[in-house]
Image (cartoon, rainbow, N blue to C red):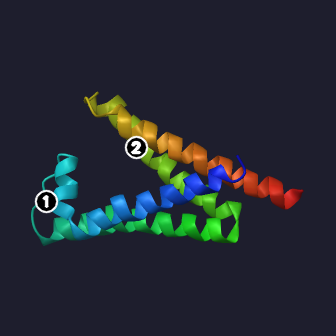
Amino acid sequence: MQKVLPIVSWLIALLLAVAVGLNWFLLPDSAAAEFGITLDGIKAYSQVRADIGGVFIGASGVLAFGLVKREPKFLFATAAIIFCAAMGRLLSLMMDGVHQDSYGPMVVELIMTTVIVLTARSFADNANS
């Protein structure tokens, strides 16, 4: 497990940067369409590139830095960002109702949070040994 968790965390970092972040940076129309969002005008493109693409790429960078340095605090920071996304989905479920695609992304975010936290804890345990 000591070797598996960091590998899975690296895969999460790649997923966040490439599949999500760069998709919003470079192909905002197709990324938005996957979520039922219509982009109207330059302000909308700027907003999703910054607030969605930028945050995912930034979180990926923080996670990658923490993995390279084996510093749990950077992993915990990334886990907190992803957990907040899951809580935003939960809030939407409570306030807006359920959609057929409501649960899948939230479950994925909670799994990613768990993997990253477990990786951070393994780094901390190794540092204290």
Q: Position of residue 109 (x, y in %)?
A: 46, 44
Image quarter hosting the C terminus? bottom right
Identify the residue shown where x is 37% and y is 41%: 105
Residue with the most extreme right position: 129
User: Foreground residue, 40 or 127?
Assistant: 127
- Residue type highlighted by circle 1: Leu
Q: Which residue is mark 2?
A: 88
Mark 2: secondary structure: helix
For disc 2, the neighbor class at 10 Å (few under 14, some 14 to 19, many from 20) is few
* Image quadrant where residue 10 sits: bottom right
For this view, does 73 lie left or right of residue 84? right
- Residue type highlighted by circle 2: Gly
For this view, does 18 lie left or right of residue 124? left
For this view, does 126 lie left or right of residue 104? right
Between the residue at mark 1 and the residue at mark 2, the CA separation in whole angstroms equals 21 Å
Instruction: Tell me if residue 72 comes above or below residue 92 in the rendering.
Output: below
Q: Is residue 93 at all visible to an observer of this figure?
A: yes
Instruction: Tell me if residue 42 comes above or below residue 108 in the rendering.
Output: below
Q: Which residue is mark 1?
A: 39
Residue with the most extreme left position: 40
The answer to whether the residue labelled 1 contacts the one labelled 2, judged by CB atoms less than 8 Å apart, is no
Q: Position of residue 95 (x, y in %)?
A: 32, 32
Q: Position of residue 69 (x, y in %)?
A: 68, 71
Mark 1: secondary structure: loop
Instruction: Tell me if residue 105 comes above or below residue 64 in the rendering.
Output: above
For disc 1, the neighbor class at 10 Å (few under 14, some 14 to 19, many from 20) is some
Of mark 1 and mark 2, the one earlier in the sequence is 1
Q: Position of residue 39 (x, y in %)?
A: 13, 59
Identify the residue shown where x is 27% and y is 63%: 24
Identify the residue shown where x is 62% and y is 59%: 75
* Image quadrant where residue 43 sits: bottom left
